Image: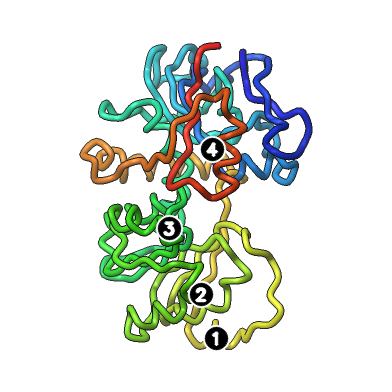
């Protein structure tokens, strides 16, 4: 089969379309002819040699896919050849074929295309885990979502709206504010020209927020703690800004009874990911069918233009997901 491969760890020009062996489905897996996949920050890190795939996972990039089942394992009961599915992968999405555990696959709603479906799993399930499972966002609580125009950010905004948050506040560059508001954000803060700590104090009359979803880490940590209310929850999903704090007063954590939860998704056990898939599907699939939730797509790009796609993400030009369409070669 054709697949996007890496010559050696490095920049986007190390990616090329090459040949790779078609994976064989295990007894509890299905083989999918992939029609579309999508980019994630993890793909860039893996391409650079900074984020190896989990043990046993495909070395091919790609954490999600959509397509049609062409083969089923002998123990598979819930799917048949020809079913259209999408789902989260530990790797292997940038290819003509991929395998997925039968309980990790989800049926594509009839109103969604392959390109729309593949834009859902990684960002929406990450956001669902952060906002609902870890953040335990309740109706009438306030949430701050950093990087609000990113894939996870745009998903988190919509989920927070469906969970009846009182105030949804996001940070994003000014050009991306309109999109965030269209999705349900009540307030938008330009992280380049405004201090989110000052703005949140104004927005909330000094009360702060209940939940924060953060990807930046060290540069935002002290300010995040300062704008959380008593019993607030800080959910850390990435370390894009750095890992080390020069100084911090731990007394602020005790005084407010702050909970700090850090999480990844790719390295979680299959059992955990299956439970998350089932909980997410129960909550979200009907909402995608009624368009209360929708995938946010920045661009659909032919997978032969994967270098340009990676460069677009690296330069932070995208609003929502960059999708790769798997064309016949």
Q: Tags 1 and 2 in contact by the CB under 8 Å rule?
A: no
Image quarter (top left, top right, bottom left or bottom right) of the C terminus: top right
Which residue bears the numbered disc 3?
148
Closer to the camera, 179 or 200? 179
Residue at figure coordinates x 31%, y 46% from the top left: 283
Q: Tags 2 and 3 in contact by the CB under 8 Å rule?
A: no
Q: Tags 1 and 3 in contact by the CB under 8 Å rule?
A: no
Sequence order check, earlier mark of 1 and 2: 2
- Any part of residue 42 in sight: yes
Sequence order check, earlier mark of 1 and 4: 4
Viewer-nearest of discs 1 and 2: 2
Residue at figure coordinates x 58%, y 30% from the top left: 306
What colouring style does the render use? Answer: rainbow
Identify the mark at residue 252; answer none if there is no mark.
Answer: 1
Badge 3 element: loop
x, y percent for residue 272: 52, 45
Is 231 above or below relative to 9?
A: below
Viewer-nearest of discs 1 and 3: 3
Which residue bears the numbered disc 2?
224
Is 35 above or below relative to 324?
A: above
For the residues labelled 1 and 2, the Cα–Cα distance comes to: 11 Å
For the residues labelled 1 and 4, the Cα–Cα distance comes to: 38 Å
Identify the mark at residue 204; answer none if there is no mark.
Answer: none
x, y percent for residue 76: 46, 20
Badge 2 element: helix
Where residue 200 sits, quadrant-wise, is bottom left
Where residue 221 sits, quadrant-wise, is bottom right
- Any part of residue 103 in sight: no
Which residue bears the numbered disc 4?
39
């Amino acid at each position: 089969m054709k697949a996007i491969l890496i010559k050696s760890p490095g920049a986007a020009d190390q990616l090329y379309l090459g040949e790779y062996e078609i994976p064989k489905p295990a007894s509890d897996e299905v083989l999918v002819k992939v029609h579309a996949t999508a980019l994630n920050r993890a793909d860039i890190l893996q391409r650079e040699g900074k984020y190896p795939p989990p043990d046993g996972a495909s070395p091919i990039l790609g954490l999600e896919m959509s397509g049609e089942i062409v083969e089923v394992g002998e123990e598979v009961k819930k799917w048949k050849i020809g079913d259209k599915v999408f789902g989260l992968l530990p790797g292997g999405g940038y290819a003509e074929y991929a395998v997925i555990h039968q309980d990790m696959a989800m049926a594509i709603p009839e109103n969604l295309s392959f390109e729309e479906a593949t834009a859902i799993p990684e960002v929406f399930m990450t956001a669902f885990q952060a906002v609902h499972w870890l953040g335990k966002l309740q109706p009438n609580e306030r949430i701050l979502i950093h990087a609000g125009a990113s894939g996870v950010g745009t998903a988190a905004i919509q989920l927070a709206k469906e969970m009846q948050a009182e105030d949804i506040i996001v940070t994003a560059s000014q050009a991306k504010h309109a999109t965030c508001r269209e999705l349900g954000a009540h307030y938008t803060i330009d992280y380049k020209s405004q201090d989110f700590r000052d703005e949140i104090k104004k927005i909330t009359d000094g009360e702060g927020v209940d939940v924060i979803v953060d990807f930046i880490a060290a540069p935002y940590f002290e300010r995040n703690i300062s704008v959380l209310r008593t019993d607030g929850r800080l959910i850390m999903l990435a370390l894009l800004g750095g890992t080390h704090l020069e100084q911090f007063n731990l007394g602020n954590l005790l005084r407010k009874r702050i909970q700090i939860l850090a999480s990844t998704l790719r390295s979680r056990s299959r059992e955990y990911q299956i439970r998350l898939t089932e909980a997410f599907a129960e909550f979200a699939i009907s909402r995608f069918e009624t368009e209360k939730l929708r995938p946010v797509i920045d661009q659909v790009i032919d997978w032969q233009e994967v270098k340009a796609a990676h460069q677009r993400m690296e330069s932070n030009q995208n609003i929502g997901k960059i999708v790769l369409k798997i064309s016949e070669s």
